[in-house]
Image (tube, rainbow, N blue to C red):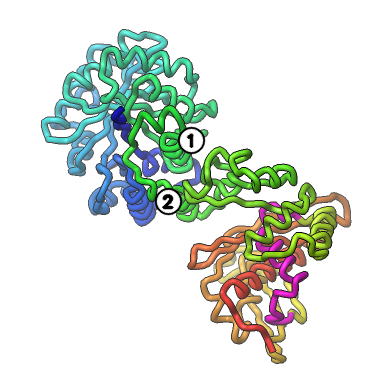
Amino acid sequence: MAKERLYLFDTTLRDGAQTQGVDFSVEDKIIIAEALDRLGLDYIEGGWPGANPGDTAFFENPPTFKNATFTAFGMTRRPGRSVSNDSGLKAVLDAKTPATCLVGKSWDFQVDVALGISNEENIELIASSIEECVRQDREAMYDAEHFFDGYKANPDYAMACIKAAYENGGRWVVLCDTNGGAMPHEVEEIVTEVVKVIPGDHVGIHTHNDTENAVSNTLAAVRAGARQVQGTINGLGERCGNANMMSLIPTFMLKEPFKSCFDIGITEEGLRSLTSVSRLLDEVLNRAPNRHQPYVGPSAFTHKGGLHVSAVQKNPSTYEHVDPSLVGNARIIPVSDQAGRSNVLAQLKEVGLNVDPKDPRVDRLLEEVKEREFNGYSYDSAQASFELMARRRLGQVPDFFQVESFRVQVERRHNAKGEQISVSDAVVKVVVDGERYMSVAEGNGAVNALDMALRKDLGKYSQYLKDLRLEDFKVRILTTGTEAVTRVTIDSTDDSDRRWTTVGVSPNLVDAAFAALLDSVIYKLLKDGAPSGK
């Protein structure tokens, strides 16, 4: 049986930009758009031309797409304006994109309260706007705002709105769950009724995640007949976000009945790039990935319990619903106080250490892990620190340099403008090949100052650390009182797209941070094959 075509429409550059704390630059938009095009999506919505200087600049000089149809978003013409003299509609059409997506009202309550016009006039706004897009040879889409609320309140009017768009040349009418309140059974029932009037290959679905049902609602709409799916990378979006394209794509390609019924235009190679696309967005936004995001999260295929590890090693499908490599992810078997020998052996194998299971050092390493975790360490995510601990026990970590001492101080003072500021400076003394180095650096906080001072001059090792970046660090107070124990975890990256996490624990926050920093530097030197010290 021939597969039906299911079209994917990404709205990250608009819906994602509405996320609190997110502000895409023009350069950011270009990077994201090019990644989406390489992934193989059908439509990329670039934003709203004329709404702000960034969107306008992006549409003036957009990237060249090889796969996707570039789409401009806007709204139907305003009441009292014709299609020729509405500045908002003109800005969308002037963007010269192959496709346009216009949002309009489909709930009679909003027509009355928000627009203050008659139901009939709203339908005319929709019809004439779509007709103008078609007249200018654009692929026209209508985003039916609050469609599900409107349908539940007045199904005849909601249907009249989308019929006006379809009958005037709309390629797609997109049913929007704008406030994210619809339930999957409602979506499936309503879309089933819609496709009786408008062919499913002209119906799209756009859901928000306010009840954690955006992906479920999207799948329900597809089951009912919708053939265009809208979503964002990592579910980015206003309030609780939008349907997560990183979950939808592999579900369509790897899960039944979708796998057998639909072609979404993405190749197996594209599917394998999914994890890197997800993390690219996080990199652009300068934030750590959501570890527990399905399919692409760093912990999506992490197995911690000893019994689970034994089962996974015998049959991965026992605890993995798909092969992680299919989506560009990887299995992680961390070690922790919940671990058994299977965890330790699996983790050693993962980092390239093939140790005899009967080697007594395995049991000693497991006991060391459990003892350290009792004292506050956590190796669940700090894989780099675990690897270093294991290699040290096996005698496989070169003695690159020795830290003689370090010191950090914080000074609060007034700058040249008379503003009160806090400045941290650090001093680190190390010995490399018998030669003593002392480095001093200022930083934005104690950890930043320590990081800069430690890497400022490490003699022959400095060349290996030029691309090392501290991406994030987290502090957790493990116990209360005057002798509180602090755990610091640090995420580091380099130009090879390698990302690793290290951990340090101490009653002193600065001491814990320095231990994690030191592990990060040594791990980098080890992975880059730096020579041992003399």
Give the image quarter of residue 68: top left
Label 1 amino acid? Gly
Q: Quadrant of the N terminus?
A: top left
Callout 2: 10 Å neighbours few (<14), some, many (20+)? many
Lower sequence index among marks 1 and 2: 1
Q: Is residue 533 above or below residue 259?
A: below
Give the image quarter of residue 359: bottom right
Q: Residue at x 27, y 33 (%)?
A: 101
Foreground mark, 1 or 2, reads 2
SS for dot 2: loop
Residue 159, position in %: x, y?
A: 30, 13
Q: Which mark is residue 241?
A: 1
- Residue located farthest toward the right when viewing the structure as drawn: 482
123 vs 459, left or right, is: left
Q: Which mark is residue 273?
A: 2
Residue 398 appears in the picture as rendered: yes
Q: Is residue 199 above or below residue 244?
A: above
- Residue located farthest toward the bottom when viewing the structure as drawn: 435
